[in-house]
Image (cartoon, helix red, strand yellow):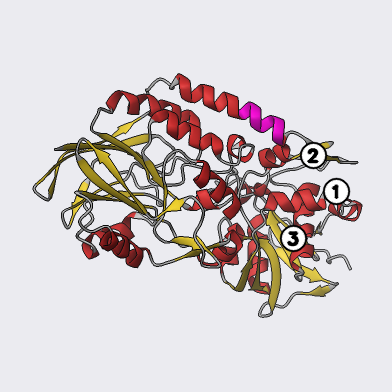
């Protein structure tokens, strides 16, 4: 019996690309086709998802004929309540064999596996989600070992299926190890690390494929299943670049954007004074974020890069505006770092080219790294080098550890590698856009935001007292 699998992974809400992918999927599928997604289809940078609690993604999947998807980290990033809302509303299975709530209870609507029937074949589909480590608690989840849980789920389904497919959002290297460890897996659709295979490959007789990211490609696998054996007949990974957008997908996006804007566009409050923004120059919006982080996490200093935002805030504030200017799902994070690493990072920040570097990194949805901004301290520099950092008028010490309120982006050393040498990290479930919303309405913090924290003195002069 023949089975065709068409698959995507790591679409990350690039839905204009997905509209082209949908056209190709509809052309390629036949009566023996399963359409599957390996996770991170729903990225909450999308206005359509934020305003519909993820329902827009479900409508797109359903309209294209998807049969199942697994839960990636981005399906979790908007919190357990949103994940449950999506999973219980979804017309297709939300699969994860290793996710539970942090109290140990099941996540409503999420299943460990499903058996799909296609032309007489019984197809077991299970899926694994990534361990977000220190973020798990903030997200409200508990993540079990994916190898053990995959083995357990396959054993529980023994005798009830003809072919086993794993939708894996743990990365291609881990998947190769998994294929060697669990020979009962016939097919692995890999995701999470955005690898693009030109065609499927065999690892320990397990068929593996990954279709890159952002719906720029779709994967296809043709199989023959007979007498307990699965044979790979053909595979390919197709670019979606030249396909025409699917009109149904485009209409769904248009309708859901209108719904989202109606919901998210409601006014929260008015700003008495605009908070302007700049990637290279010190600016009040990024200062406000640094001040808010320091206050929220009660640290020695606050620290954030201006690339976290991509525009200023003017007059009326709404959730729509906050999502537009700060789309990155990054979290308030505290950590300890030595004075010498802070000096190195701020010296790097004085270089305009460093500020304009590509900010790409986990969770980052901006363009540039941006300049570092500080709260609770003053930076003294000569334009090229940081001469001193003053906290309460006292110079920081190179070997002393300071408690910093920042983001998980900077904690990982993204953009500013010297900051990665830290310890005692603590993460919060809120996002940086929530920090803006909370503190931009407080007069005290608005006033503080316009007080500049960097001072320059002549190379041969003396630093200001």
Pick out the residue farthest to the bottom: 399
Q: Is residue 314 visible?
A: no
Is residue 45 rendered magenta in the image? no
Q: Which residue is mark 3?
A: 293
Tell me where residue 198 appears, x and y as whole percent: 26, 40
Specify which label sits upstream in the sequence, 3 or 2.
Answer: 3
Q: In this rendered view, identify the residue nearer to me: 314 or 223.
A: 223
Tell me if mark 2 has few (under 14), some (14-19) or many (20+) residues whose alpha carbon lies within 10 angstroms of its own: some
Q: Please identify, in this view, whether the residue under mark 3 or under mark 2 is nearer the observer.
A: 2
Tell me where residue 449 appears, x and y as whole percent: 84, 52
Asked if disc 1 and disc 2 are in contact, CB closer than 8 Å, the reply is: yes
Please report the bounds of the magenta region as a residue range: 257-263
Disc 3 secondary structure class: helix
Type of secondary structure dominating the magenta stretch? helix
Give the Cα distance between marks 3 and 2: 19 Å
Tell me if mark 3 has few (under 14), some (14-19) or many (20+) residues whose alpha carbon lies within 10 angstroms of its own: many
Q: Which residue is mark 1?
A: 441
Q: Which mark is residue 317?
A: 2
Disc 2 secondary structure class: strand
Q: Determine whether 414 is above or below 28 in the image.
A: below
Give the Cα distance between marks 3 and 1: 15 Å
């Amino acid at each position: 019996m023949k089975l065709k699998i068409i698959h995507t992974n790591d679409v990350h809400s690039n839905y204009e690309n997905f509209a082209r992918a949908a056209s190709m999927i509809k052309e390629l599928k036949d009566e023996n086709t399963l359409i599957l997604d390996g996770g991170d289809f729903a990225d909450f940078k999308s206005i359509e998802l934020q305003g519909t609690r993820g329902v827009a993604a479900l409508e797109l999947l359903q309209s294209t004929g998807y049969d199942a998807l697994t839960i990636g980290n981005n399906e979790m990033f908007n919190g357990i309540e949103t994940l449950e809302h999506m999973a219980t509303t979804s017309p297709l299975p939300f699969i994860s064999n290793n996710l539970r709530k942090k109290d140990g209870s099941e996540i409503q609507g999420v299943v460990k596996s499903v058996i799909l029937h296609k032309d007489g074949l019984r197809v077991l589909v299970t899926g694994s989600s990534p361990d977000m480590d220190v973020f798990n608690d903030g997200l409200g989840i508990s993540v079990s070992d994916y190898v053990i849980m995959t083995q357990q789920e396959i054993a529980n389904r023994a005798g009830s299926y003809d072919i086993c497919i794993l939708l894996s959002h743990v990365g291609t290297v881990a998947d190769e190890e998994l294929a060697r460890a669990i020979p009962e897996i016939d097919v692995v659709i890999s995701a999470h690390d955005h690898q693009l295979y030109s065609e499927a490959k065999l690892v320990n007789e397990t068929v593996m494929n990954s279709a890159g990211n952002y719906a720029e490609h779709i994967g296809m696998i043709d199989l023959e299943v007979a007498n307990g054996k699965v044979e790979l007949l053909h595979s390919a990974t197709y670019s979606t670049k030249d396909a025409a957008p699917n009109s149904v997908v485009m209409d769904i996006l248009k309708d859901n954007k209108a719904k989202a804007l109606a919901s998210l566009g409601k006014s929260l409050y008015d700003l008495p004074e605009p908070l302007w923004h700049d990637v290279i120059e010190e600016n009040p919006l990024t200062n406000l974020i640094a001040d808010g982080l320091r206050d929220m996490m009660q640290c020695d200093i606050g620290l954030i890069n201006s690339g976290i935002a991509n525009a200023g805030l003017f007059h009326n504030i709404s959730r729509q505006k906050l999502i537009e200017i700060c789309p990155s799902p990054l979290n308030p994070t505290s950590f300890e770092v030595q004075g010498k690493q802070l000096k190195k990072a701020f010296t790097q920040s004085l270089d305009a080219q460093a500020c304009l570097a590509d900010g790409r990194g986990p969770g980052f949805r901006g363009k540039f790294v941006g300049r570092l901004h500080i709260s609770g301290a003053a930076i003294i520099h000569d334009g090229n080098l940081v001469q001193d950092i003053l906290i309460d008028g006292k110079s920081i010490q190179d070997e002393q550890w300071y408690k910093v309120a920042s983001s998980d982006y900077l904690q990982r050393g993204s953009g500013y590698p010297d900051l990665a040498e830290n310890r005692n990290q603590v993460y919060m479930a809120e996002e940086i856009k929530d920090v803006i919303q909370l503190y931009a309405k407080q007069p005290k913090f608005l006033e503080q935001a316009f007080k500049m924290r960097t001072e320059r003195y002549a190379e041969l002069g003396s630093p200001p007292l």
